[in-house]
Amino acid sequence: MTNAVKHLLIINVIMFIGTMVVGGGNGELFYKWFALYFPKNELFQPWQIITHMFMHGGFAHILFNMFALWMFGTAVELQLGSKNFLFIYFSAGLGAVLFQLGYYYFNYIPIHAELIGSGLTSDQITQMLTSNQAINGINEVQFLNLKKLFPIFNASMVGASGCIMGILAAFGMMNPDAKLMLIFLPIPIKAKYFIPGIIILDIISALTGQSFFSPSNTAYMAHVGGALTGFFIMWYWKKNQFNQNRWY
């Protein structure tokens, strides 16, 4: 196991244990501190942009993510070195945040504007979304719009999936003919086809709500953002032949 991958695994496991033991063991306190909340939510804090990358929602979530980190991260770190591996890893995590929050805002802003236009104030909207209780006098259309905003306003994002999708994209760029397969679909597929296919399925899932291989509460656009970030970093590096223009 390579050095950076080993330390990332350790940090993720420590954070997962913290989720289980801090604040009574139900994870609520750790989630309030370190999960990434929608910026309009009062629970949002700037450090969550980084800390959510080390949080996970359950044993299966961390197991599959850490397995992928070990499998693909080790190969990428061996080929690129620790500094460049970590650069891709955290850049992909930030790209995942940018895409997912951008997708949230894309859906949130027009509905919020419609509610403001209907006579509600911003404070009233925030109050109802925070408390999950409607104030007196709202009509059916306003209520339905609030229902659309509620899951966005109260969304929280955890997991290293965006980072790992960036590493997976980097792996595919360096090893396009490597054969990969899903555990529950044991058909070997070359990385240059497998990875774009996963990204396309994530986009379809985000737009339609149809889940293929992930739980329905997956932040699909975070996967897309992480993968595209990893791809463009590797594209830039390959284009410049790892010369003096390489990003460190």
Image: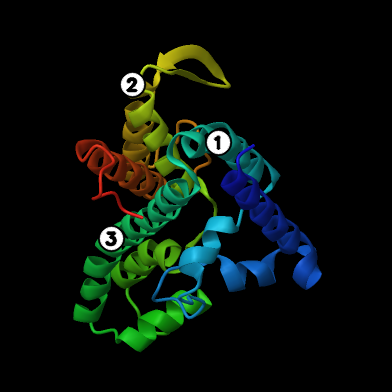
Front residue of this view, candidates 171 and 4: 4
Q: Position of residue 228 (x, y in %)?
A: 30, 43
* Residue behind mark 1: 74
Q: For mark 3, does the 10 Å Cα neighbourhood hold few (<14), some (14 to 19), or many (20 or more) residues?
A: some
* Residue behind mark 2: 193
Q: Position of residue 158 (x, y in %)?
A: 54, 57
Classify mark 2: helix, strand or loop. helix
Q: CA distance from mark 1 to mark 2?
A: 21 Å
Q: Earlier in the sequence, mark 3 or mark 2?
A: 3
Quarter of the figure that contains the N terminus: top right
User: What residue is drawn where x is 57% and y is 20%?
Assistant: 184
Q: Earlier in the sequence, mark 3 or mark 1?
A: 1
Can residue 121 be seen from the camera position used here? Answer: yes
Q: For mark 1, does the 10 Å Cα neighbourhood hold few (<14), some (14 to 19), or many (20 or more) residues?
A: many
Q: CA distance from mark 3 to mark 1?
A: 37 Å
Q: Position of residue 12 (x, y in %)?
A: 64, 53
Quarter of the figure that contains the C terminus: bottom left
* Residue behind mark 3: 107
Can residue 134 be seen from the camera position used here? Answer: no
Front residue of this view, candidates 138 and 231: 231
Q: Amino acid at mark 1?
A: Thr
Would residue 20 appear left or right of 139 to someone viewing this image? right
Q: Earlier in the sequence, mark 1 or mark 2?
A: 1
Closer to viewer: mark 3 or mark 1: 1
User: What residue is drawn where x is 44% and y is 83%?
Assistant: 127
Q: Are marks 3 and 2 in contact (CB under 8 Å)?
A: no
